[in-house]
Image: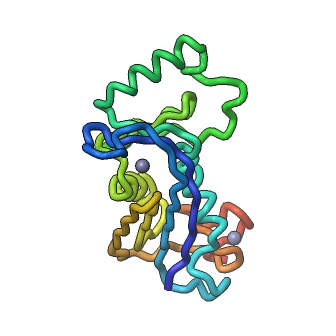
Amino acid sequence: MKSVTTFDLQYAHRFYGFKGEAQYLHGHTGTLTIEVEDSVNMGVNMVFPCNEIQKTAWNVLKNFDHATILREDDPLLPAILEVYEKQGIKNGAPQNTMKGEAFKTELATAYPDCRLVVTKETMTTEGMIKIVYELLKDKLNISKITFTSGVNAATEDYKVSKTIDRCPLCGITLNQNGVCPKCGYRKNN
Ligand SMILES: [Zn+2]
Ligand SMILES: [Zn+2]
């Protein structure tokens, strides 16, 4: 069975070098759907509580919300950074509070202080799916990611082979000692 969670992300990007309207900087509300697959945890009769999937994923996804997403070789990147620098907002601003945790993977680097994500490849819907899977695959048993943005949509299925040990009382992942970090349940009690 699967638990399915959806997120809205508002962001600006462009397809650098692309011959079409998308070569101009523009914005979207994108919708990301993450499907988590596992056995049904009989204690709570759920695969995984969706608010917990939301918490785990949003920690990372916050970086893409109200952010500008540019490819690493896009000349807009140094231009924007120069403006932010001159304005004194490159390294943060008191009003920039809804920040995600900075991350760096093969495919993307997040700079929450100036709300930028720098990507290796063009941030298409396919590109976003690859980035999100890389960021969350070790935290959640992801079986499918779908991303839609404007008229573009992409989806990818993943093979799930492991089962995560979950609390029978609140459904969240037990830590390595078999203890629930939320309610304190102990597996071998
Ligand atoms: Zn676009
Ligand atoms: Zn618990």
Vertically, is 94 above or below 58?
above
Percent x, y of residue 141 = 45, 70
Q: Residue at x 34, y 40 (%)?
A: 23
Tell which residue pokes out farthest to the right in this image: 183
Percent x, y of residue 96 = 67, 31
Q: Residue at x 42, y 62 (%)?
A: 151
Tell which residue pokes out farthest to the front in this image: 21
Display colour scheme: rainbow
Q: Residue at x 38, y 27 (%)?
A: 76
Percent x, y of residue 64 = 52, 45
Q: Which corner quadrant holds the C terminus?
A: bottom right
Percent x, y of residue 133 = 39, 59
Q: Quadrant of ligand 2?
A: bottom right
Asked if residue 169 lies left or right of residue 188, the reply is: right
Foreground: 104 or 127? 127
Tell which residue pokes out farthest to the top in this image: 86
Foreground: 41 or 104? 104
Asked if residue 4 lies left or right of residue 23, the reply is: right
Vertically, is 25 above or below 130?
above
Q: Residue at x 55, y 86 (%)?
A: 40
